[in-house]
Amino acid sequence: MINVLVNGALGRMGSLVINAVEQAEDMSVAAGVDVFSKGGAVYRSPEEVTENVDVVIDFSHHTLTPPLLDWCVEKNVPVVVCTTGHDEAETAAIERASKSVPVFFSANMSLGIAALADLAKRAAALFPEADIEIVEAHHNRKLDAPSGTAIMLARELQTVRPGSTLSMGRSGQARREKNEIGIQAVRMGNLPGTHAVMISTDTQTLTLKHEAHDRALFADGALAAARYLMGKPAGLYDMKGVVAGK
């Protein structure tokens, strides 16, 4: 049985992770931690935790990552960092901690997005002369555009398109350059998160698409990441390893 500490336990995603862990046959909730806790079953800090912990899943806030990592290193506990938006110092803290304990860190915790990235890279390699566009759509309340996931997909595609450039949006006199990867963002209504990678030649177009129907998919990905870390040596891991099964 894998004993999971959920950091950010009172948040929306933390609650979904707890629910997913409780339904998993191979996992149990060791403890919950949240800075907004007012006592009771949820601790305010990992320093208060006395239960046996095998892995931490963190869905709190990026500013809380460094002290959490310090605790994980002290206790020799693997950690799945699901927060995003880290600055340079926080990112450095993640890399530093990975030299002592297994750290899983990904810009998107969706297994489906990881599979999309893998398939898109393979397809792009098969059609080296094809045009590539990434189109992402989200609800009208999302602040950032393009999404971090769209940028992540583009960066992955650049690994099989050396020298390619990213084009964020298109307007006016904007003839397509030969070696660019375009990214377009749509914001409207209450759309779920959708990411499509379009790979087009003069004779055919291949479209690979992922749609998010429920935020619980990120909890599912976090649990897969936690299982993946069990028995791993210290290091920095991500969804590519989960998809590859290595």
Image: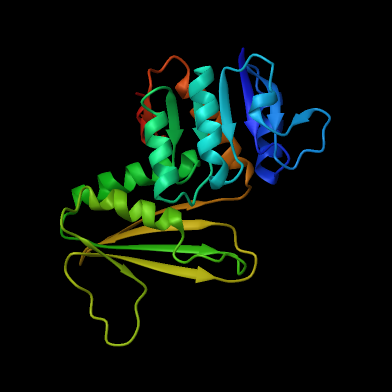
Residue 22 shown left or right of residue 95 in the figure: right
Residue 104 shown left or right of residue 32 in the figure: left
Residue 23, can we see it? no
Q: Position of residue 25 (x, y in %)?
A: 65, 17
The residue drawn where x is 35% and y is 29% is: 244
For the C terminus, the image quarter is top left
Displayed quadrant of residue 168: bottom left
Q: Position of residue 135 (x, y in %)?
A: 41, 64
Residue 204 shown left or right of residue 79 in the figure: left
Q: Is residue 114 above or below residue 75?
A: below
The residue drawn where x is 68% and y is 22% is: 49
Q: Position of residue 216 (x, y in %)?
A: 63, 41
Q: Position of residue 110 (x, y in %)?
A: 50, 42
Q: Is residue 26 above or below residue 224?
A: above
For the N terminus, the image quarter is top right
Residue 120, can we see it? yes
Tell which of 98 and 198 is nearer to you: 98
